[in-house]
Image (cartoon, rainbow, N blue to C red):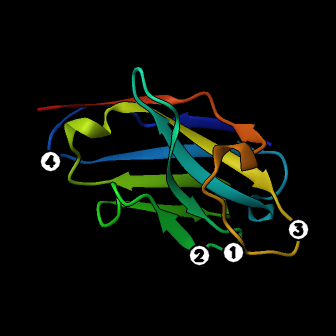
Amino acid sequence: VQLQASGGGLVQAGGSLRLSCAASGRPFGDYVMGWFRQAPGKEREFVAAISPSGVVTRYADSVEGRFTISGDNGINTLYLQMNSLKPEDTAVYYCAARRVYYTDNIYRDSVQYNYWGQGTLVTVSS
């Protein structure tokens, strides 16, 4: 699967952005999908993930209640709705996918993902 992330930009603290990740290749529902981010000088960290069925979602504590991950299987696109943005949310955001078989598990560890998009920069000003 090939992943193309978009939607990043500059926003003031308290604002909102929606990131998109277009997937091409196998059907979207064959993958666990996730969002990760990497701030300057920091390691890549988990943000959110969604199971192949879309039923199970998980979030990092730092974004719980502010971010929402969702997917549209009809157009093979993953979203991350980000509300109440904070300066500490500033990072390059990456979408990722892992091919799975007969499971609705999700994964928080980046090493579990096989496919990565190119990243989109989100900058939140104070």
Q: Label 4 amino acid?
A: Gly
Q: Residues at badges 1 and 4 in contact (C-beta under 8 Å)?
A: no
Q: Which mark is residue 101?
A: 3
Of callouts 2 and 4, which one flags the residue occurring earlier in the amino acid sequence?
Answer: 4
Q: Label 2 amino acid?
A: Val
Of callouts 2 and 3, which one flags the residue occurring earlier in the amino acid sequence?
Answer: 2
Q: Label 1 amino acid?
A: Ser
Looking at the rendered structure, the secondary structure element under dot 1 is: loop
The residues tagged by marks 1 and 4 sit, at their Cα atoms, a distance apart of 31 Å
Of callouts 1 and 4, which one flags the residue occurring earlier in the amino acid sequence?
Answer: 4
Q: Residues at badges 1 and 2 in contact (C-beta under 8 Å)?
A: yes
The residues tagged by marks 2 and 4 sit, at their Cα atoms, a distance apart of 27 Å
As drawn, the residue found furthest toward the bottom would be 55
Residue under the point 62% across and 72% down: 54
- Which residue carries the number 1 mark? 53
x then y, percent, for residue 75: 66, 56
As drawn, the residue found furthest toward the top would be 41
x then y, percent, for residue 72: 60, 63
In the picture, which quadrant includes the N terminus?
top right
Looking at the rendered structure, the secondary structure element under dot 3 is: loop
Looking at the rendered structure, the secondary structure element under dot 2 is: loop
Q: Which mark is residue 61?
A: none
x then y, percent, for residue 18: 38, 48
Q: Is residue 12 above or below residue 42?
A: below
- Which residue carries the number 4 mark? 14
Mark 3 vs mark 1: in front: 3
Of callouts 3 and 1, which one flags the residue occurring earlier in the amino acid sequence?
Answer: 1
Q: Residues at badges 4 and 3 in contact (C-beta under 8 Å)?
A: no
Label 1 crowd bin: few (<14), some (14–19), many (20+), radius 10 Å: some
* Left or right of residue 68: residue 114: right
Residue under the point 25% across and 48% down: 16
Q: Which mark is residue 56?
A: 2
